[in-house]
Image (cartoon, coloured by chain):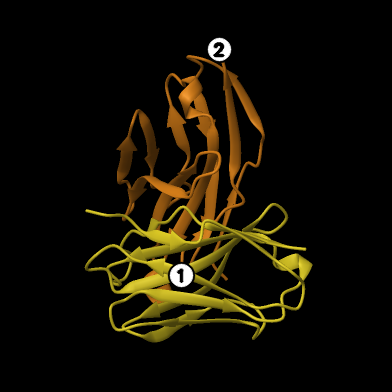
Chain colours: A yellow, B orange
């Protein structure tokens, strides 16, 4: 079956703009999580959605937001982009039960100039 | 809070050498433990997992044993190949964190012919 699909793969934006990233989970998976990966901070958890509800949230400012649709697809939005938001954004999907494994997409590489 | 510590490297080995990447964790309760691998330009792939004490996860010649008494989950491989060059992440989830994966900083491995 198809894996986790993230679009777009690459994105270049200007400071102050906003951006929306998309993630389509594996069919049947109801949980979608988002992570930010940077060389300095490593992999940091942004938030997790399950059945259209945010169930868990990391320590990121309110400029980072997300949502999940009824078909489990998820979007992540970053408003008022800063240079420090340049990163690889990874999406993971899972069945949503405790301690089930997460499957990751290839990520969206966001560059803010 | 829950956390994962691992040797950061970079680690450089000759082909067919023995590999050990150390990983220790701090968590409440009984976490599930994972090793993920990230090849250049790619997302994360689950390499192996263990969900309870003394479990041994194994895949593609890699092994790791869940040691509750030492809170460790060290990754080993008897004979590495050039194709194993990648970044390896030790990670955990807990029952109370739902699908939030807590990652270590990652260990970069380079295998030279």
From the viewer's side, name the closer residue of B30 and B110: B110
Residue B70 position in % (x across, y down): 49, 48
Q: Nearer the viewer, mark 2 or mark 1?
A: 1
A39 or A74, which lies in front?
A: A74
- Percent position of residue B68, x then y: 41, 52
State left or right for residue A61 relative to residue B32.
Answer: right
Residue at image point 32% right, 36% down: B59
Q: Position of residue A40 (x, y in %)?
A: 73, 55
Disc 1 chain ID: A
Q: Chain of mark 2?
A: B
Q: Are marks 2 and 1 in contact (CB under 8 Å)?
A: no
Q: Is residue B26 above or below residue B84?
A: below
Q: Which mark is residue A22?
A: 1
Residue at 30% across / 72% down in the picture?
Answer: A96
Tell me, for residue B68, which label it has, or none.
none
Between residue A34 and residue A108, name the one nearer to us: A108
Mark 2: few/some/many CA within 10 Å (<14, 14-19, 20+): few
Residue B67, visible in the rendered structure: no
Residue under the point 31% across and 76% down? A72
Res. A73 image quadrant = bottom left
State the quadrant of the C terminus of chain A: bottom right
Asked if both marks, 2 and 1, belong to the same chain, the answer given is no
The residue labelled by disc 2 is B113
A57 w.r.t. B112: above or below:
below
Residue A69 visible in this rendered orientation of the protein: yes
* Above/below status of A61 relative to A23: below
Q: CA distance from mark 2 to mark 1?
A: 39 Å
Question: Residue A95 at x, y = what percent?
Answer: 27, 68
């Amino acid at each position: 079956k198809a894996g986790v699909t993230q679009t777009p793969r690459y994105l270049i934006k200007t400071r102050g703009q906003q951006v929306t990233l998309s993630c389509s989970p594996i069919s049947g998976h109801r949980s979608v999580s988002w992570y930010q990966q940077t060389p300095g901070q490593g992999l940091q958890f942004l938030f997790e959605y399950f059945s259209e509800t945010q169930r868990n949230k990391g320590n990121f400012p309110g400029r980072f937001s997300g949502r999940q649709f009824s078909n489990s697809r998820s979007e992540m939005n970053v408003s008022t982009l800063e240079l420090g938001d340049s990163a690889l954004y990874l999406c993971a999907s899972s069945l949503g039960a405790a301690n089930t494994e997460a499957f990751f997409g290839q990520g969206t590489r966001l560059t803010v100039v | 809070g829950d956390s994962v510590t691992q040797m950061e490297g970079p680690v450089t080995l000759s082909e067919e050498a023995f590999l050990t990447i150390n990983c220790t964790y701090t968590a409440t309760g009984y976490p599930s433990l994972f090793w993920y691998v990230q090849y250049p330009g790619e997302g994360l792939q689950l390499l192996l997992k263990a969900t309870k004490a003394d479990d041994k996860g194994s895949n593609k010649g890699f092994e790791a044993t869940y040691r509750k008494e030492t809170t460790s989950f060290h990754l080993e491989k008897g004979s590495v190949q050039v194709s194993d060059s990648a970044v390896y992440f030790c990670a955990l989830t807990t029952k109370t964190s739902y699908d939030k994966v807590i990652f270590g900083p990652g260990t970069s491995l380079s295998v030279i012919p």
